[in-house]
Amino acid sequence: MSKSEVYNSNKRRIFFVLILLVLLWGGILSRLLWIQILDVKKFSKHEVNLIEEAVSQRKQEVVLHTGRGDIKDRNGKPLTGSEVVGVAVFPLVRGYVDEEKVASMANRLDIDKDELLHFIREVKEPTFVRNREGKIISLYDQDAEAVDQLRLPGILALPITERYQTDGVAAQLIGYISQNPEYIEKEYAEELKNGELTRKSLIGASGLERSFDRFLQGVGPTSVSYFVDGKGNPLNGLEARLIQQDNPFYPLSLITTIDHELQGEAEKWLAEEGIDTGTAVILDAQTREILAMASRPGFHPSKMDVAQGNWVNHAIKQTVPGSVFKTAIAAAVLEEGIVKPDEEFVCEGHYGKYGFSCWKEGGHGVLTFEEAFAQSCNIAFAKAILRISPEKLEDYAEKLGLTQPVGWREAPFFKIKSFQQLSGEDKGQIFSKGTAKNDEGVLIQTAIGQRDVQITPLQAANMIATIVNDGEKQEVRVVKEIRYRTGSLFYSFDEADLPGEKLDRYTAFQLRRMLELVVQNGTAKVLQDAKWKLAGKTGTAQTPVSGKNNQWFIGYGPADHPQYVVAVVAEQVDSSSRNKVLPVVKKIMDHLAFQEEQAKNLIEYNN
């Protein structure tokens, strides 16, 4: 090839490269033009508002109230925090800090000056000054005014309502809120389109926060913010800015059936008895209202780790019931008339097949069926269950509410297709799918609440409430009302029956007599020294974890006129461990008896 041909060839290559560069840069510039001018509010498939994002990057903000509705106990006491005035610190201070003023503020807060000074200099994002327990230090009005008069840059006395306090109760029942853009796009498409929510909005992730999320959604958070430059310094002319929504009717509030004091005591007693995993459920025996629902292990919503699982409410999750399930077996064979309370059974300690044995070495000898119930004899119940069909047994489990969720529910409910007060509640089961129900080995294990049997502590408590109410089935409530911000009523949750057939009144009467025998002369004799005469059923269940048992007690008090129902469960307890649930039951019932006595004395005094 000649020099001129090479030269011309190179010119063509250079020309094509220049053309490609022009096209490439033209595409990039046009894309930038589109993003910055035309597509600025709906960038990408997620429709990100770039103006909003840019402003948020130049803003230091502290949220004073999430804008969500409050959750309160039965007496109106907040379960989701109450307003306090604290000291908010924005990371605006650079270099020099007036130590004399900081010392004055430290004195007002009753904390060490050097600790406060270090905190102010090291703070990375807007936050409130807290004590060593992690709780916001609360100020009186005169102290708050004094802090503001110090005029320290980026330090303000502000009213704040922390949704979840460090010493709060009923954490698993209340649940937690989090950001979930994908869920919002799926379930809140209309609200997202109308601007009522954004992809960053906080929504309920579990508990009442989730089930009542549409009602708790507010009209926007209340916040204070500073606009800053790239170095974090406040922009000239832009002071602290308060953003709040003023709506006389919203947000709505939930009025629950929970007794704040009783809830706190129940949580304390579970911890005191060393129950690491488990629950205590306390119901009003007549109304089926949940007075307390404590769950272990504990957790705090502000320190959320989904993988840990401590946010799970064990009161509504199914687990192995063990001998408390003998209550359902007794109901079935008594109502069908195939076993009489005084019929005698022989327990020699072993069934004779399958390696099945009684918990009492050597057996109970000859005992009546009601005595077998009181002593929780495995052999007697293994023999009794063979007299009834598996299908009939499932029918009676349904009569007692053990195979269906028992929490208040309705469908449809406002905009919600399938509403339930207790989000994530399990339904329970007697036999697994595919299990050979008529197999003798399967049935005798079912008789003692093992094999496939799974129920929730709430179902067990409601079963007892059904028995003390002559077989009447009813849904359990944990929220009584939803109210406007003004206090007027938005919606009231009335009592509602559980669907399905009911237990016979006489069967319920027979079961109450047998439940009393458990405390009088059976496996729960340690409860005889309680303030009230009590009744109930104990249970110990083997779990899939080797060497671990579930300990149970379900019952009621006073025995002669039932007012309260309890279910206490300690899960995954060492098989050699002492009984941990009966001391909790006694503390609960003695506390309730004391409260009833105090109320009675007050009425007599006023009269």
Image: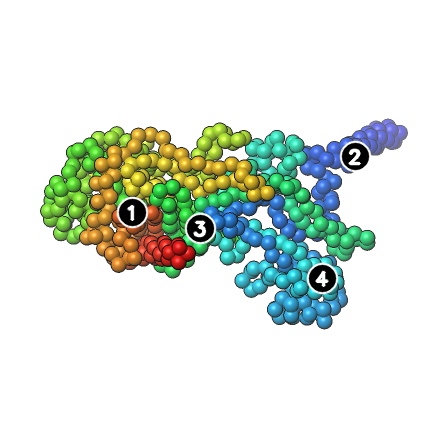
Q: Quadrant of the N terminus?
A: top right
Q: Is residue 383 left or right of residue 593?
A: left
Q: Which residue is mark 2?
A: 37
Q: Quadrant of the C terminus?
A: bottom left
Q: Is residue 281 left or right of residue 524?
A: right
The kind of secondary structure element at disc 4 is helix
Q: Which residue is mark 1?
A: 561
| Sequence-earlier tag: 2 or 1 | 2
| Sequence-earlier tag: 3 or 2 | 2
Across and down, in percent, residue 465 comes to 32, 42
The kind of secondary structure element at disc 2 is helix
Alpha-carbon span between mark 1 and mark 3 = 21 Å
Tag 4: residue type? Asp
Alpha-carbon span between mark 3 and mark 4 = 38 Å
Q: Which residue is mark 3?
A: 259
In this view, 332 is above or below 360? above
Alpha-carbon span between mark 3 and mark 2 = 56 Å
